[in-house]
Amino acid sequence: MSIHSEIIGEGDPIVLIHGFCETSSVWRPLTNKLALSYQVITLDLPGFGKSPLPSSSFSIMDIAEMVHGILEDNNLLQSAVIGHSLGGYVALALAERHAEDFKGFGLFHSTSFADDDEKKRSRNKTIDFVKKRGVEVFADSFVQQLFYVKNRSRLETEIRQVTKIAGETSETSLISYMEAMRDRPDRSNVLESLTLPTLFIAGDQDGSVPIEKSRAHYELMQNATIKELKDVAHMGMFEATQECFVAISEFLSNVYPSNNSYDTGMLPDRDLKKNLGCG
């Protein structure tokens, strides 16, 4: 299975996994600055961006195994992994089966809790809506709701960009992932048993992953930190870029104590990119 991946920078590795109807490009507000101190690996999950969709149905664990395989093939294990939303579900599946292969985990607007009955009904309604109206119509309303209403005017350009990315998702990919998310198991036990450094980033206006869930996760953990973002919904990398960068940098300094060279100043405009050659 081919997964499109890129590396930016050098140093201790961090893997960033994007969310539903996104691509690796959503991490760009953060990657250039993180790459000043770390080797930043981003990828397009199968079925998004430049990565083809698996030919058969799949679970979140199946996707996690594909990600693990591409990291192993490129000697990129023993990294820290941060996942946004769906990407967090993938990160937790990695933690469940391969915790020994990683240095730390981050849930960026994500949760270990399984869908409750109401959420499952909502996902089924979305599947029906997309079948009737199409992906682009869904994307127009879906992406808007990911941003706190008070942030939408200043982030119009970013919202258009994310909407375009979401609208380019194939109907098959969207439905397949909606089903995989709906059917994923509760992985709270994975968090409870995890001793590796763990980061939670949560928005106080997030309607997709309410901040109370992140607080509940934090209470379960042995070695965790939590960053609560004020007036932020589900897209902290755009809504509170600098706060997210600082939170991730501080987390990484805990994961990699010997690397304390990060600078939490303002983000530069820098692009040092190379392909992994694996997708």
Image: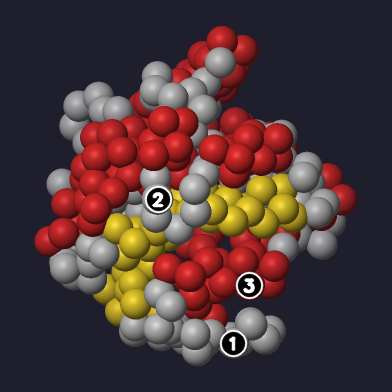
Disc 3 crowd rating (10 Å Cα; few below 14, some 14-19, many 20+) is some
Assign a secondary structure to mark 3: helix
Q: Position of residue 248 (x, y in %)?
A: 55, 67
Check contact, mark 2 vs mark 1: CB within 8 A.
no
Q: Name the residue under label 3.
A: 246
* Picture coordinates of residue 102, whole percent (x, y): 30, 58
Helix, strand or loop at label 1? It is: loop
Q: Which mark is residue 195?
A: 2
The answer to whether 170 appears left or right of 154 in the picture is left
Name the residue at 72% across, 63% down: 240
Mark yes or no: residue 90 visible. no
Q: Are marks 2 and 3 in contact (CB under 8 Å)?
A: no
Q: Which of 231 and 125 is in front in this view?
A: 231
Image quadrant where one finds the C terminus:
bottom left
**Camera-side residue of 81 and 155:** 81
Q: Which of marks 2 and 1 is nearer the N terminus?
A: 2
Circle 2: is it few (<14), some (14-19), or many (20+) Cα within 10 Å?
some
Question: Would you say 3 lies left or right of 140 here?
Answer: left
Amino acid type assigned to the residue bearing label 1 in the image: Asp
- What's the residue at 49%, 48% (across, down)? 222
Residue sitting at 50 percent across and 89 percent down? Answer: 261
Q: Mark 1 points at which residue?
A: 263
Residue type at the position of mark 3: Val
Vertical order, 72 against 88 (above or below): below
Secondary element under disc 2, as helix, strand or loop, is loop
Residue depicted at x 25% and y 24%: 57
Q: Which of marks 2 and 1 is in front?
A: 2
